[in-house]
Amino acid sequence: MAKPLDAESSLPIFRIGVFALIFNHEKHILLGHRRDIDWWNLPGGGMEFGETVDEALCREVREETGLEVNVGQLVGVYSKPQKQEVVLTFLCQVIGGTLQSTEEIRESRYFAPDALPGNTLPKPPIRVSKQKSQ
């Protein structure tokens, strides 16, 4: 007979990632240029044990950009089966902080959705275009 799973003894089956779509007043999207790889990506990352989705997203955006945000509407749920990951993407609004380079991100910058850098990870342009068309 199989042992029942509980939160303390079972390993997570999926990692949960949270990412922010942050647009400025010109409708340009915020991307961060990662230090560990030469790619631009949306601000975000993995949830830590004990965090809510909102807490994780606010922490990730603050750690990567220096900005404080309000988490808004869920705009996408994506799966990465090869990484055993589920990714949630939210519209976010900047409410404070100062855009700056950080330990993880060498530069953050707003880009027009039709003029993203060539070395942008594959998924952000898809997420931005889906949001732009709504």
Image (tube, grey):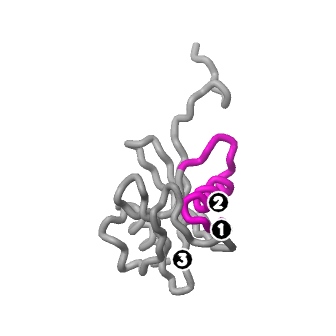
Q: Position of residue 67 (x, y in %)?
A: 62, 68
In the rendered image, which residue does mark 1 sit on?
Answer: 69
* Disc 1 residue type (three-letter): Val
Q: Nearer the viewer, residue 129 or 109?
A: 109
* Disc 3 residue type (three-letter): Phe
Q: Are marks 1 and 3 in contact (CB under 8 Å)?
A: no
Question: The magenta stretch spans which residues?
Answer: 46-71
* Disc 2 residue type (three-letter): Cys
Q: Position of residue 107 (x, y in %)?
A: 46, 67
Q: Which residue is pictured at 36% across the width and 65% down the height? A: 120
* C-alpha span from label 2 to label 1: 6 Å
**Quadrant hosting residue 115:** bottom left
In the rendered image, which residue does mark 2 sit on?
Answer: 58
Give the quadrant of the N terminus: top right
The disc, 2 or 1, on the residue closer to the chain's N-terminal end is 2
Q: Which residue is pictured at 42% across the width and 81% down the height? A: 112
| Secondary element at tag 2 | helix
In the rendered image, which residue does mark 3 sit on?
Answer: 23
